[in-house]
Image (spheres, rainbow, N blue to C red):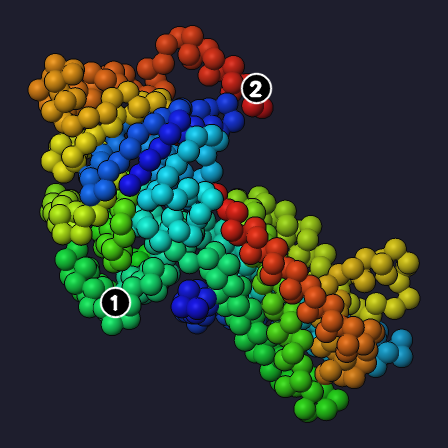
Amino acid sequence: MGAIYIMWLRELKRYVRSRAQILVSLGQPALYLVALGYGFGPVFAKAGMGKYLEFIAPGVVGMTVLFTSVFSGMAMLWDRQFGFLRETLVAPVPRIQIMLGRTLGGATVAVIQGVLILAVCLIAGFRPHLWVAVPGSFIFVAMIAIVFAALGASIGSVIQDMQGFQFLMNFLVMPIFFLSGALYPLKNLPVWLTWITHGDPLSYGVDGLRGVLVGSWQFSFALDLAILAGLAAVLLAVSARLFSRIQL
Amino acid sequence: MIRVENLTRTFGQLTAVNDITFQVEVGEIFAFLGPNGAGKTTTIKMLTTLLRPTSGRILLDGFDPWVKQREARQRFGIVFQDPSLDGEQTAYENMELHGILYHVPRRVRGERIEALLRQFELWERRNDTVKTFSGGMKRRLEIARGFLHTPKILFLDEPTLGLDPQSRNQLWNHVKTLNAAEKTTVFLTTHYMDEADRVAHRIAIMDHGKIVAIGTSAELKERTQTDSLEGAFLALTGTSLRDEGASSSDQLRRFAQMWQKR
Ligand SMILES: Nc1ncnc2c1ncn2[C@@H]1O[C@H](COP(=O)(O)OP(=O)(O)OP(=O)(O)O)[C@@H](O)[C@H]1O
Ligand SMILES: [Mg+2]
């Protein structure tokens, strides 16, 4: 248990110590929120779909959690490069504990970032349909964080260089974001695109957030939660497996 | 304590470790010498569960490190040739993390960390992040960390790389004390022949993935009719630089390999 704790703590320390980075990583979603939220607002309203800011705020929270958690997992690349990975690989504790600590640490950081951006949303004028929905949304924030921290960790266990990182950012993480319904409703899309969006795990996370926060569901609470929980279990197992097989 | 039989590891075309066999006894200080690229680090990686052997057998205190990773890891400590510190954390935090991962009991952890950081003259800088350290200070921290827990087998892969003479002296004294007091088995590599001569009970010399000689320092000198370990080393491994000293047919082959890879 000590190993899980100390690896978790390390992620948290790194986060708290990089204040500049906290601001930078909140800046991008804040930009989406303001530029798109206010920019597309009128068009959205004209189409009879209500306030775009209400729509996009949960999406922006999901986006923040997605990127923070995936990056935390992929940060293993740096540990590989700078050598710290070696130290943890030969330690006399099951590698799964090291992995769990790292992943939970990354997920915790992502939850904190998600909460901060939710506060930014509220400041920017976003209003949930019920105030109790705000703490209620934590469950989906946490699920998204765990799913994608585990995904990031799986990727981090496999990639060895910057090219691999860039490739996966462009061809996996960005599509996950854009096809998740974070920015536009997943309704009336071409059939093939509908299929893809239904295969995107973040769709369920964003739907859960949006459902809880503004009361409009594409799927349902139970389905969203079930899919995310199942996926979290699978990805944690996969990441542990991949991590335990790393050779240097 | 360490038993290696017909151990081989290949990387694509290259045979980094080629069918080596040796044994290290309990409480022995064993030096593994060889020119750059001889295969020393690759051997250590296989011994320490980081790399899977292509073929051959290893027993570490009776356990195969690849099959019984957990048991093997509980038995050794290692100072890597390449850096393995967390640059974002302080010296103290690096030590503490190591102590927790290696199950050093809480009541002795603090004391031991302080003693080691003082011994390697890092105590004043304990609360600075490691990325602000000089190369030698980082190296000293790696070594201090390696001594934090007391394993049965200690692997030291070029531990003195980049250290000043004072620190080197500290290191070897510590190793000898540990070895005498706790019967710690030590497996080390170094490019400084005088160090090997001074601390090692037995020495193996490796070249091109093969062990070319094994014995005490005196035996190696005797065998090569030289009066220093350095002389013996050069007599056994040749004076040419690795990669440059290859014969012309070797070079042709290497050239061909390079083109095949594209
Ligand atoms: N991961 C790897 N992939 C490909 N080749 C490798 C890898 N690791 C080592 N090698 C090759 O194996 C050979 C032995 O390397 P090794 O690091 O074991 O040498 P060494 O004896 O430790 O040398 P040095 O004294 O320079 O540390 C070298 O030719 C090296 O290029
Ligand atoms: Mg080496």
Residue A100: x and y, percent?
A: 52, 63
Where B36 falls versus A161 (above or below)? above
Expressed as whole percent of the image width and height from the top left, the position of residue A121 reads 65, 80
List x then y, in percent, for residue A108. 53, 72
Q: Nearer the viewer, residue A166 or B35?
A: B35
* Ligand 1 within 8 Å of the CB at mark 2: no
Badge 1: few (under 14), some or many (20 or more) residues near its Cα, within 10 Å?
some
Amino acid identity at mark 2: Gln
Instruction: Check the picture and name the quadrant holding the C terminus of chain B.
Output: top right
Q: Position of residue B198 (x, y in %)?
A: 11, 36
Q: Please, which chain is the residue tagged with disc 2 on?
A: B
Query: Which of the marked residues, 1 or 2, is nearer the chain's N terminus?
Result: 1
Sort mark 2 into few (<14), some (14-19) or many (20+) by Cα contacts within 10 Å.
Answer: few
Query: Residue flagged by tag 1: what amino acid is it?
Result: Arg
- What residue is shown at x 70% (from left), y 66% (from top)? A230
Residue at 21%, 48% (x, y): give it: B184
Q: Which mark is residue B260?
A: 2
Q: Secondary structure at mark 2?
A: helix
Q: Nearer the viewer, mark 1 or mark 2?
A: 1
- Locate the N terminus of chain B by quadrant: top left
B211 vs B13, nearest the viewer: B211
Residue beneath disc 1: B109
Please, is residue B70 above or below residue B214 in the view? below
Who is closer to the viewer here, B74 or A111?
A: B74
